[in-house]
Image (cartoon, rainbow, N blue to C red):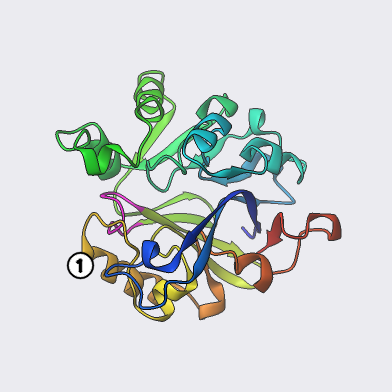
Amino acid sequence: MVYELYAIKYGQRDGRKPEFFQGGDPHDAPMALDYFVWAAVSPEHPERTVVIDLGFTAATGTRRGRVVRRTPAEGLALLGIDAATVQHVIITHCHFDHVGNIAEFPQATFVIQDEEMAFWTGRYAGKPLFRQIVEPEDVVALVRHNFDGRVRFVADSQEIIPGIAVHRVGGHAAGLQIVTVETARGTVIVASDAAHFYANIEEDRPFSIVNSLPQMYEAFDVIRRLAPSPDHIIPGHDPLVMERYPAARHDLAGIVARLG
């Protein structure tokens, strides 16, 4: 099964380089961070459309000082994808910018790693440094959907549907998973927050928010091993994605990039 893969920008944040790397950065220069969700679309089987991550809600983004360009559901609609009919959503991890908007996907099953859910329902989730990077109601919503049979737990690597698989790497979050998608140009790696920026993986420089530093370095190795080439690696927050890949349509430049 081969998919068309898209990155959809829904928000952004203007920061400075030292904020985004372990140990800071000697150049105190401006650095932007974009917020994306991703969609893998099968032209022959539209019912198999898979959405990767759910972004943050407009209310959460505004409260946290992020620029909200559109909701993820509005971004998906630009590609003709109705969030209300999506059957498969992969949640790479539970940080606030990846697991909001659950209510916008009433038909979906949510795919998450056992270890990620266990961490955010465990003893350390409420510690201040962890608490600040999640919205508790997002986690509670997942717990509730587990009781109505709409959460699919996976461990390590597993095919979700033909042509799309997840791989636990940890590092940035306890159960962070990356996603491999088969496209016409080969296997594309949606790294999500295993590599926020191209610089993380190209320069072997971990991001500033870390659950396990050794696992973050190991995640870089896993991504490199799975990718046919560096051009097949899609970082989770790098504005350069919109420059390195063509727009899905001419009117979607800077909004939706076609990755494969």
Q: Which residue is nearer to you in this view: 20 or 233?
A: 20
241 lies left or right of 191: right
Which stretch did the figure color magenta? Answer: 168-176
Q: Given the current orientation, which residue lies at the most extreme front position? A: 28
Q: Position of residue 85 (x, y in %)?
A: 66, 30
Residue 181 against residue 141 in the figure, above or below:
below
Classify residue 72 by image quadrant.
Answer: top right
Classify residue 194 by image quadrant.
Answer: bottom left
Residue 17 against residue 10 in the figure, above or below:
below
Residue 245 against residue 160 in the figure, above or below:
below
Q: Position of residue 63 (x, y in %)?
A: 49, 33
- Any magenta on residue 171? yes
**Dot 1, how many residues are within 10 Å of its Cα: few (below 14), some (14-19), or many (20+)?**
few
Residue for badge 1:
214
Q: Amino acid at mark 1?
A: Pro
Q: Position of residue 160 (x, y in %)?
A: 46, 48
Q: Quadrant of the N terminus?
A: bottom right
- Any magenta on residue 66? no
Helix, strand or loop at mark 1? helix
Q: Residue at x 65, y 56 (%)?
A: 6
Q: Quadrant of the C terminus?
A: bottom right
Q: Which residue is nearer to you in this view: 56 or 68?
A: 68
Dominant SS type (magenta): loop
Q: Residue at x 74, y 68 (%)?
A: 246
Q: Position of residue 83 (x, y in %)?
A: 65, 33
Q: Residue at x 77, y 59 (%)?
A: 248
48 lies left or right of 119: right
